[in-house]
Image (cartoon, coloured by chain):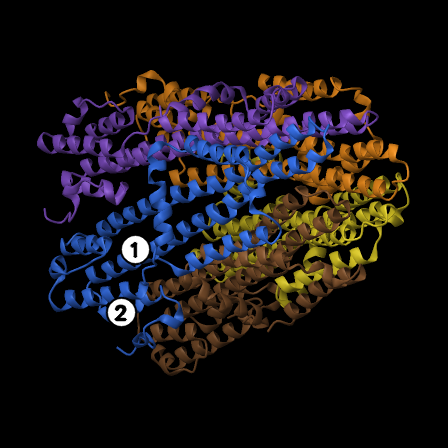
Chain colours: A orange, B yellow, C brown, D blue, E purple
Amino acid sequence: MDIASVIGLVLAVGGILGSIMSGGAISIFIDVPSILVVFLGLVGVTLYRWPMEVIKGLVSIAMKSFFFTAVDPKEKINKIKELAELARRESVFALEKAEIDDPFMKKAMTLAADNRPPEVIASILQMDIDSMESRHKTGSDVFGGVAADGPAMGMIGTLIGLVQMLQNLSDPSAIGPAMAVALLTTFYGAIIANVFANPVKNKIEYRSQMELMSMSIVIAGTLGIVAGENPRMIIEKLNSFLPPSERSSDDDGGGEE
Amino acid sequence: MDIASVIGLVLAVGGILGSIMSGGAISIFIDVPSILVVFLGLVGVTLYRWPMEVIKGLVSIAMKSFFFTAVDPKEKINKIKELAELARRESVFALEKAEIDDPFMKKAMTLAADNRPPEVIASILQMDIDSMESRHKTGSDVFGGVAADGPAMGMIGTLIGLVQMLQNLSDPSAIGPAMAVALLTTFYGAIIANVFANPVKNKIEYRSQMELMSMSIVIAGTLGIVAGENPRMIIEKLNSFLPPSERSSDDDGGGEE
Amino acid sequence: MDIASVIGLVLAVGGILGSIMSGGAISIFIDVPSILVVFLGLVGVTLYRWPMEVIKGLVSIAMKSFFFTAVDPKEKINKIKELAELARRESVFALEKAEIDDPFMKKAMTLAADNRPPEVIASILQMDIDSMESRHKTGSDVFGGVAADGPAMGMIGTLIGLVQMLQNLSDPSAIGPAMAVALLTTFYGAIIANVFANPVKNKIEYRSQMELMSMSIVIAGTLGIVAGENPRMIIEKLNSFLPPSERSSDDDGGGEE
Amino acid sequence: MDIASVIGLVLAVGGILGSIMSGGAISIFIDVPSILVVFLGLVGVTLYRWPMEVIKGLVSIAMKSFFFTAVDPKEKINKIKELAELARRESVFALEKAEIDDPFMKKAMTLAADNRPPEVIASILQMDIDSMESRHKTGSDVFGGVAADGPAMGMIGTLIGLVQMLQNLSDPSAIGPAMAVALLTTFYGAIIANVFANPVKNKIEYRSQMELMSMSIVIAGTLGIVAGENPRMIIEKLNSFLPPSERSSDDDGGGEE
Amino acid sequence: MDIASVIGLVLAVGGILGSIMSGGAISIFIDVPSILVVFLGLVGVTLYRWPMEVIKGLVSIAMKSFFFTAVDPKEKINKIKELAELARRESVFALEKAEIDDPFMKKAMTLAADNRPPEVIASILQMDIDSMESRHKTGSDVFGGVAADGPAMGMIGTLIGLVQMLQNLSDPSAIGPAMAVALLTTFYGAIIANVFANPVKNKIEYRSQMELMSMSIVIAGTLGIVAGENPRMIIEKLNSFLPPSERSSDDDGGGEE
């Protein structure tokens, strides 16, 4: 789990609660009918927007994005270096029995050990990437929908409150509190969109990018192994995926071989 | 029909009605001239935006997206496995007489049985995909137009109401109700956009993606059959369309063959 | 002319006028300085945004999009079937003398009769498509500009009105009417954008799509004829451009030939 | 210089000034601190957004887009026809000495006269197009930034004015004028964005498109000349860049040759 | 460091401060709970949006974009000319020992000296470009997130302030100052987005474009050297990256060679 997420959530919620409590009781920010319209409305519209099979996977996607620890691409590159050396020393068939934790890398190496032609390996693995990206895209779209529907439901709630208040202006002392309550739904909608839905959407998209990079490293590495390239040359290529400062030093001046 | 849609619609409308009724009579949210400007205006602009042939297909598109039950891609893959085995056992010509419910898969197999070259099969089927996507794109654009025009007509209605109210401030007790009525059109517009048009647009787009995936499975499978590939290898490829957790188990370690 | 456009415009304008008149005299919605700022400003900015040659073609583009009757793609397909049969019976040279109304199809068939290589035919016709799309894109951009500038000019007008009103609050009874007048420019801007400019933009874009489809049918058909394909096979391919329900019946099970 | 630009600017500014003066003195729309925050802020943010070398070229880009007179693509086509006939009559080497005003066409013809292979000519000229597009893209982005920052600075100014007014409500008669002044920055921001920055951005983009078309005509023509194509056939191809109504008549029925 | 950035930041902040101070004490624009909600909330949401490894690199990215001095592409071209002449005079192997400051050009020349095939050189260097673009894209996305979250947190703070004020209208003289304080968070959010986050985002994107151009020049030059092209012809090609006015004069009429 990423420690930044926890600190971030605590800071954001803490800042908002602190600001609320420094100005009065927190109870004036809780109103049941307002919660009704925003939360029921939002859950309803989300259920209505997406088929059941997407909804089911939602909690798991949100959790994964929260507890997601980025895979270090350097580790992937080191593992591929090891496998490339194994394939050189013995043969590509040895990759079959190599111990590999990452199921995608396992699949890639099994395809290599099967002696499949490179285009076939690339196209099968690319389909895995496309499928991963499309699943993440749906997850990100769901939270994007929540980030749009939350404020929309908030605005609908505020309009309901304003219409009711304006139809009944006989008691001037009730106008202020009525407007305050009307604004609460807008407040809930803004919190849902900006403190929850948008950051989760962002995390899913970033995670998708990271997995894409990690899978691209595996594909490039596997194709290098299948082509019988020198392990050093493979690593030199894969190093381009890393920021210059993190590239393994024995690649600098990669031309000495 | 997708059960999530029904629950969702009931929750969203229920939440809004509940919030309205907890604060007073529902009658103050009904105003005939406001309905006139938003609904007539919206229907008018929509008719004006699109030619007749698009309008005609509208209700059917909306209904389909509502009652749409997602085709399970696993079923498609199993059917293709069956057909691939049939083609192996007998010949591609046997595909002609195979019983196939899905008209697109039927067309693909007929093309395969006709012994057409793979590029021709791929390009004919791809044109079907393009045509399906373009039809769905129009449907999604229509509802996107409604989601934009609804609030716009609501704002026009509110401006009309405000101008009329401001021109006639002689009776202070009428100001509140007049503003309430002016806000109703904005309220109607927000409901139309967020509770109806946007979710339907979303459903059409998701359905289009699902059909695209399903048709892509059929094309990839047909090309595999035509190329005389091993049924297991075809299924292994098609499994990439599924999320890892749903892939059929006999594909794991697909290299044992 | 598309009947939906007329009905739509009548309904939209009617709904707005009905709503205005149900609440008072229509005269309070007419204010000369407001019209001055919105209309002169909008015309000015539009003239300033685009060079003269674009402005000149504007009215014609708007008219065409309004009076545009969609070409039935089925008719195009039938005409191509006829020409394909002619080319089969006699030779491609016979296409030269065939009677063809559509100038683009005429050009395509003349190129075919000239015995030009297929790549040359495709690239010349594709340039016609690109040029048509770019002209329509400019038309759509102009109306998109109007849809953005209308409300912007409306907001500028409203700001002018508000500043003038706020500088002179000495007569309380004048505040309401002054604000009403200030809001009129926003109202004009909203009408211009949502009732005129956006639907016209939409119509131009849809028309462009329809012409693209129609021209793509002609290109695909011409290339089929030049390649000496069987007329039935050509039609089978072109049918993919149509929605499944409209495909000509003799294509169903297109493999019997 | 495009006459539409002048008329347009006069109309837009005139409409706004007319509307202001019909309602009172123009002096109430001038406030020094408001000008300070919007203009200094906008200049500051723009300087901060872009490096010095972009800022330097700014005035020249804005001027060029204003005084830009569109090159008539027909002229380019006629010039190319002339050059194609020259190359036919004599040889491509004669192109070296041909008198050509347009430096890009000059460069293209020099490359042709140098007998460079067509791919080399195309790739060198394409790099010129990419470089022209990227320069125009930066110009358009700068004005897009101004169009976004103007209203943003206006809103910051209005917030400053509102906060100051609300902190000091002791003199009721000062509230109106204070709010009027607060709104002025929003007004300035809206004028900057909608009357200046957006139209200039639009002009730059349109000019870029026109230059792209003009340069594409030169490339297509040069490649035709290098390939030794018939001048009539070259013109027939280039005519596709023009709207159908402007194509030179001897192209109609381009198959008679 | 770019002098325009310093002048720009001073002008923007100075303009805002000047406007504030011309209207009263600056102290009314400072409120601790408002700062709490906007700054803590913004830091929190940003931490929550991005994983730790991105956050860590943030300050460095912001600093780099601020102190970034654009590399003059002309210098790169001159250096490549020098190297191309060296390779001509001696051989590509001489490039190994050439003194090159830019690590990317060094890498390119080492690859050239290693006698790698051009496709391999191009694909390895292209991966470096992709990796650089993806890192800059993340940096730009982070500041884009700040530019969106700042105003969102500002709006949440303003809603909190408004709700608290409306619940407690008993003291009329407190309403104004309470609203003023409520507006402060919106003000802070607008400053953060428009004076800090957006310009930094813009600088990162522009810098990314400049590096892309610079790296593209190196790739094109290296491929030219590897292909054994004439140095003058290489420079002629690379000159297309420069605006016409800056091209080195010996390229005009590049065909004299």
Residue at position x 73%, y 40% from top?
Answer: A155
Secondary structure found at label 1: helix
**Amino acid type, residue under disc 2 in the picture:** Met
Label annotation for residue C116: none
Q: Earlier in the sequence, mark 1 or mark 2?
A: 1
Looking at the image, can residue D118 be seen? yes
| Same chain assignment for discs 1 and 2 | yes
CA–CA distance between discs 1 and 2?
19 Å
Q: Residues within 10 Å of mark 2 (few under 14, many from 20)?
A: some
- What chain letter is assigned to the residue under label 1? D
Residue in the foreground of this view, choosing between E181 and D204: E181
Kindly identify which residue carries mark 2: D233
Kindly identify which residue carries mark 1: D215
Q: Quadrant of residue E67?
A: top left
In front: label 1 or label 2: 1
Residue at position x 39%, y 62% from top?
Answer: C126
